[in-house]
Image (cartoon, rainbow, N blue to C red):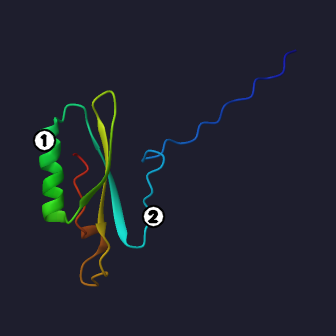
Amino acid sequence: MAAPKPTKVRKPRSTLPSGWETSSEDYEYVPLRLPPDVNRVTASMRLTIQAEFGGWELSRVRAYTDGSRRVLLRRRKTAADPTQPAHEASQPEAGM
């Protein structure tokens, strides 16, 4: 009887590419994925709107061969406002 083959244990896929550090006391980060059907002009406009109205700035971009992009936005952390619940904080739309 043959010995059973060892099973490979896959690590869960990270939401960020390796090497993208998101722990900082000064900044908060949010990852976005832009699908392949979003052209450069549309992507630029969406990110510009997030920068203008949400205070986000572009930290990193990674383009993939299928045309999709992974984007990491960051903004300076502000002192917590006790009158505003945390879930109402300005976050970029997930459907970008």
- Residue at image location 13% in from the left, 62% down from the top: 52
Q: Looking at numbered disc 1 in the image, what kind of residue is underneath it?
A: Thr
The reply to whether callout 1 and callout 2 are in contact (CB within 8 Å) is no
Where residue 92 sits in the image (x, y, percent)?
Answer: 23, 56
Q: Earlier in the sequence, mark 1 or mark 2?
A: 2
Rendered image: mark on residue 23: 2
Q: Is residue 27 left or right of residue 67?
A: right
Where residue 35 sits in the image (x, y, percent)?
Answer: 25, 36
Asked if residue 92 is positioned above or below residue 38 in the image, the reply reads below
Rendered image: mark on residue 57: none
Q: Is residue 91 left or right of residue 49?
A: right
Q: Looking at numbered disc 2 in the image, what kind of residue is underneath it?
A: Ser
- Residue at image location 33% in from the left, 57% down from the top: 30
Asked if residue 43 is positioned above or below residue 78 in the image, the reply reads above
Numbered disc total: 2
Asked if residue 1 is positioned above or below residue 59 in the image, the reply reads above
Secondary structure of the residue carrying numbered label 1 = helix
Q: CA distance from mark 1 to mark 2?
A: 29 Å
Q: Callout 2: few (<14), some (14-19), or many (20+) C-alpha neighbours within 10 Å?
A: few
Residue assigned mark 1: 42
- Residue at image location 44% in from the left, 44% down from the top: 17
The quadrant holding residue 25 is: bottom left
Screen quadrant of the N terminus: top right
Q: Residue furthest top?
A: 1
Where residue 13 sits in the image (x, y, percent)?
Answer: 49, 41
Q: Is residue 52 left or right of residue 11?
A: left
